[in-house]
Image: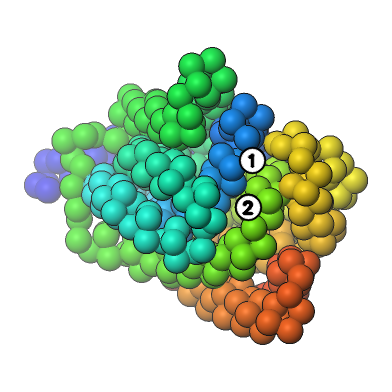
Amino acid sequence: MNQTNLTENQAKGRGGHTRAAANRMTSGPIGRQILSFAFPLFLGNLFQQLYNTADSLIVGNFIGSNALAAVSSSGSLIFLMVGFFAGISAGAGVVIARYFGAKDSMRMERAIHTTVAFGLVAGALLMLLGILFTPFILRLMGTPQEVLPSSVLYFRIYFCGSLAFVLYNICVGIMQSVGDSRHPLYYLIFSSVVNVVLDLAFVAVLHLGVGSAAAATVISQFLSAALCLFRLTRVEEEYRVNLRRVRFDMPMLKEVIRNGLPTGFQNSIIALANVVVQSNINAFGKMAVAGCGSYSKIEGFGFLPINCFVMALTTFISQNLGAKEYERVKKGTRFGILCSVSIAELTGIVIYLLAPYLIACFNSDPEVVAFGVTQAHTVTLFYCLLAYSHCLAAIFRGAGHSGVPMVVMLVCWCIIRVSYITLMVHFIPKIGVIFWAYPLTWSLSGIIFTIYFFKADWMHNPR
């Protein structure tokens, strides 16, 4: 970049600071800022969960339990494939938020365009990997033979939308890192409505089968990605995306990967552990797969307050550490954890009480309902532990210490969880043993995070 362009960019950055000041979280009332940022995220996550649940609801009611089992085995496999790239995106958001808080528009611009370039390449790679390895992974998971063909078809079509999925998450990460959580909400509402309408049209009206449910999701993902990218290429603020500047800046790519690689690795390892857990559930038959898969969709709604405060805390911590506002970091940390833990526990109680009716919405078969209710009654009252661990992990990531949650979750949520299940199921072959692995490992990770949080000088040494 020549000196003339550098001067022009700096001038644009100064003007952008004024226009983007409303999105900064480095001054003003802390509680109101976190809540005003988290609430659109909550609504966005709500529609995202509706988006993800529509396939199971419509397939389960209009095609049957075999098709529901085929779709229900999706969570672990999809997260296994996309978790790594989602982690890199999270690392990019931390870098962008840090430069945004520090008002370093030149480096922020380089980080944004490098991240978009990464998203394009990663999305294409994920599509190829997903299409090629889906049958192998499903067989490795012990997917029941009677639902295997439908599962392979569903996932291969789903992974055709990988480019849209990755690009959407990249664009949303950019907007959220600069404090804009409203526009992702608008686009997600629109694409969710489209997804539900297409699901009903393809499955209930045209009877095109389980593959058409995946096609509806892919179409919706491309729409949401296109809307997000259109927004970023039209804004006047300093975080505008210029498609001609989308390229890899190697020093910036290294910084993004350094921040995102631990989270990406963590996501992939946790997903791999969940694949092992799913394989143990599969051993109990297709009704167990359908029941537990139905619960997982409901559980997604329980995670909503956790996810929105996790993203809000990561952005808040990153921006304020970039601006060296350490006292605001402490106050925001306390407020975010308290809100997330309280709301998550209330949500868990509601799901616990309504579990039989909620599971029956997906499939009314008594055996399917029984499996789903058993899992719900085992884990939902411990959502507060899950929220606590995720919030502390978000705080460490926002400070650039993403290696801490990676190691803790690798040990607790992967090694210990899988070891516990493998050992206990051998001696006590009951599915409830698998369900108890979650609250036990959530508790352990929360204890370790707390020790590190109070003993380490992580805040005054952000990376």
> In the picture shown, does residue 102 fall above or below 277?
above
Q: Is residue 187 visible?
A: no
Marks 1 & 2, CB-CB < 8 Å contact: yes
Give the residue drawn at x 45%, y 24%. 208
Query: What kind of element bears circle 2?
Result: helix
Residue closest to the eye, 102 or 219: 219
Q: Amino acid at mark 1?
A: Ser
Earlier in the chain: of badge 1 and badge 2, it is 1
Farthest-out residue, right:
353
Percent x, y for residue 308? 64, 46
User: Which quarter of the rendered picture does the C terminus lie within?
Assistant: bottom left
Residue closest to the eye, 95 or 410: 410
Percent x, y for residue 320? 55, 56
Q: Amino acid at mark 2?
A: Lys
> In the picture shown, does residue 284 fall above or below 114?
below
Position of residue 135 in the picture relative to residue 64 (left or right): left
Q: Which residue is mark 2?
A: 286
Percent x, y for residue 381? 84, 58
Percent x, y for residue 453? 66, 76
Query: What kind of element bears circle 1?
Result: helix
Distance from Cα at disc 1 to Cα at disc 2: 8 Å
Give the residue drawn at x 47%, y 50%. 148
Residue closest to the eye, 289 or 340: 289
Q: Quadrant of residue 109?
A: top left
Q: Which residue is mark 1?
A: 65
